[in-house]
Image (tube, rainbow, N blue to C red):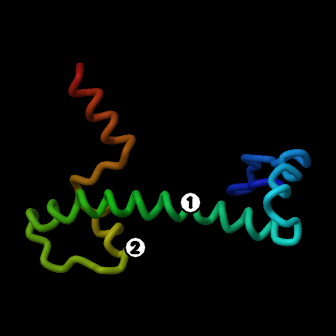
Amino acid sequence: MKVTVDGKDIFTLTETQKKVIQNDISSEVFDEDMKRRLFYIIDHKYRQCFKRLKDEWDKKLEAAGVESIPTNKDAYAELVFARPEYMDRKAKDEAAAANLK
C-alpha cells in the first residue's frame, strides 16, 4: 500500500507491515480502514489548527471593529488570511527570530 500526495509517494507499507496490521484488521476491510485512518489524522489536524486560528483571531477581529464574522469555516479563514496583520507560521517564526537579533 502506498500513500501518495500530489503525485509523490510519501509512504509505502511493506507486505510484512500490511500482514502485521491484518493480524488485527480483516483483509476484507483493510484498504478502507487505512483510508479512514488517514482521513481522520488529516481532518483532526485541520480541526485543531482551525480551532487555534479561531481562538487567536476572534479577539483580534473584534478589536479591529469587524462587525460581520462568517460562521462558515472557509469564509472565516479567508477573512483572517486577507487581514494585513495576518502571519502564517513561517512569517511568525521569521519575525520572532528577527526580534532576537
Q: Residue at x 12, y 67 (%)?
A: 62
Quadrant of the image for the C terminus?
Answer: top left
Out of 60 and 30, give the one closest to the viewer.
30
**Left or right: 89 as drawn, with respect to 35:** left
Residue type at the position of mark 1: Ile
Q: Is residue 47 above or below residue 71?
A: above
Q: Are marks 2 and 1 in contact (CB under 8 Å)?
A: no
Q: Which residue is farthest top?
A: 101
Few, some or many residues within 10 Å of mark 2 (<14, 14–19, 20+): few
Between tags 2 and 1, which lies in front?
Answer: 1
| Residue at x 62% of width, y 65% of height | 39
Residue drawn at point x = 88 percent, y = 65 percent: 27
- Assess disc 1: are there few (<14), some (14-19) or many (≥20) residues with their C-alpha within 10 Å of its C-alpha: few
Q: Which image quadrant is residue 52 in? A: bottom left
User: Residue 89 in the image: x percent, y percent?
Assistant: 37, 44
Instruction: Tell me if 77 is positioned left or right of 69 in this view.
Output: right
Q: Quadrant of residue 67?
A: bottom left
The residue most toward the right is 15
Towards the viewer: 70 or 23: 23
Image-quadrant location for residue 1: bottom right
N-terminal of the two: label 2 or label 1?
Answer: 1
**Mark 1, residue position:** 42
In three-dimensional space, the C-alpha distance between marks 2 and 1, rounded to whole angstroms, equals 16 Å
Q: Which mark, residue 74?
A: 2
Q: Indicate the amino acid at tag 2.
A: Asp
Position of 56 compared to 39: left or right?
left
Secondary element type, mark 1 = helix
What residue is at 30 percent from the left and 41 percent from the top? 92
- Residue 24, horizontal then vertical, whole percent: 79, 58
Q: Secondary structure at mark 2?
A: helix
Which percent across, then down, holds residue 7? Answer: 74, 55
